[in-house]
């Protein structure tokens, strides 16, 4: 921890020294750069090689408004787009798809599938080399890296492919924010901060190959980026085609009732939303075979027969997760409910 704090303090000194136009301060900054250990005074008192950890949460970097940085909305949009384009690409790449049918992996019964889940958070990180004399790897250390990891792990609980924190949602363009769904308000393991978590409702489709682009075409699209892409890109429209206004209205009402502590009403609305999703899946002809097998754990709150499992897989993961949580506690909000819950698993 001490090394992380010292490196962050060094980075702070570089970042914040740019705001100063005083020749004296600039000279001091150049002098300090030749003595890295002195940088620790930017965020904590130093005694020998130690850093005052009490200053950790009061760092100047932690108080920087990322949205005020030039180009941050475009940068954040591109980061989310990169994950979504990766999601689409792995489900249309023939080489990757063939691995799903490889006998060595699935034993001929489809026991394995290739997929990716994503978690996102925004904030500072310290890059460093970690390892031994035999093997050293670059790694990134910070609470925000841990938060992104928690978001990725939580995708399995909610039956979605991507979760992002409120910190990321605030940095996105308005067009991108309109496509996100607020699924819950939580605290994650290792943090007491309450925050909304969001998903982009990406669904696996067997016709992603119809929207493939050559590398040069993809580069051209990237160069011509504008926020309008969220409303016109074929991949983005296809993976979110299963979401309709009726479903969103029912889910938002159910989620709001859940957060407000009106759990009986919340369960009714969320079951209604889940039914809408299931019926829409039937109408659109989606096959349950394209759903990630790891989401089958969501069937635990229904009967454990094949029909119930298929019904669950074709429904909505966040609806089912919130319903399961409320029913585990008797369907009534506990006394002292404050509108959020802890995610207990990493």
Image: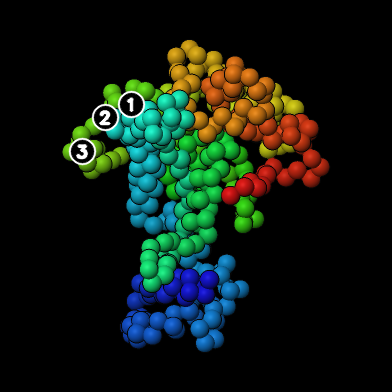
Residue 40 vs residue 345, the one in the foreground? 345
Numbered disc total: 3
Q: Which mark is residue 208?
A: 1
Say whether marks 1 and 3 touch (CB < 8 Å).
no
Q: Position of residue 152 (x, y in %)?
A: 50, 45
Q: How is the image coloured?
A: rainbow
Relative horizontal placement of residue 242, taking residue 343 as reference (left or right): left
Q: Which mark is residue 194?
A: none
SS class, disc 3: helix
* Residue under the image location 63 percent in, 33 percent down: 321
Say whether marks 1 and 2 touch (CB < 8 Å).
yes
Q: CA distance from mark 2 to mark 3?
A: 10 Å
Looking at the image, residue 330 lies above or below residue 344: above
Looking at the image, residue 65 lies above or below residue 202: below
Q: Which residue is mark 3?
A: 215
SS class, disc 2: loop
Q: Position of residue 332 (x, y in %)?
A: 78, 33
Q: CA distance from mark 1 to mark 3?
A: 16 Å
* Residue under the image location 52 percent in, 75 percent down: 2
Residue 208 figure quarter: top left
Relative horizontal placement of residue 156, taking residue 9 as reference (left or right): right
């Amino acid at each position: 921890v001490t090394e992380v704090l010292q490196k962050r303090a060094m980075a702070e000194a570089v970042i914040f020294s740019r705001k100063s136009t005083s020749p004296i301060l600039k000279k001091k900054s150049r002098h300090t750069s030749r003595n890295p250990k002195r940088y620790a005074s930017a965020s904590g008192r130093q005694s020998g090689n130690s850093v005052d950890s009490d200053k950790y949460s009061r760092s100047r970097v932690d108080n920087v408004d990322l949205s005020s940085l030039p180009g941050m909305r475009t940068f954040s949009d591109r980061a989310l787009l990169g994950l979504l384009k990766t999601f689409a690409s792995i489900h249309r790449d023939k080489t990757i798809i063939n691995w799903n049918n490889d006998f060595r992996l699935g034993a001929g019964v489809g026991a394995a599938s290739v997929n990716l889940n994503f978690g996102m958070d925004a904030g500072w990180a310290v890059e460093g080399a970690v390892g031994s004399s035999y093997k050293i790897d670059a790694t990134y250390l910070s609470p925000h890296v841990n938060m992104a990891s928690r978001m990725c792990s939580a995708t399995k609980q909610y039956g979605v492919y991507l979760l992002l924190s409120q910190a990321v949602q605030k940095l996105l363009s308005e067009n991108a924010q309109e496509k996100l769904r607020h699924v819950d308000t939580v605290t994650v393991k290792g943090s007491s901060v309450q925050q909304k978590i969001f998903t982009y409702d990406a669904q696996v489709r067997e016709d992603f190959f119809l929207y493939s682009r050559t590398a040069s075409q993809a580069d051209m699209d990237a160069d011509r980026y504008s926020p309008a892409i969220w409303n016109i890109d074929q991949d983005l429209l296809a993976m979110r085609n299963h979401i309709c206004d009726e479903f969103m209205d029912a889910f938002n009402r159910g989620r709001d009732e859940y957060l407000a502590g009106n759990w009986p009403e919340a369960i009714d609305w969320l079951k209604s939303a889940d039914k809408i999703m299931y019926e829409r899946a039937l109408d659109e002809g989606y096959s349950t075979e394209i759903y990630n097998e790891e989401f089958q754990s969501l069937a635990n709150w229904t009967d454990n027969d094949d029909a119930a499992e298929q019904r669950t897989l074709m429904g909505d993961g966040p609806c089912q997760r919130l319903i399961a949580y409320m029913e585990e506690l008797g369907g009534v909000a506990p006394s002292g409910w404050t509108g959020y819950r802890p995610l207990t698993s990493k």
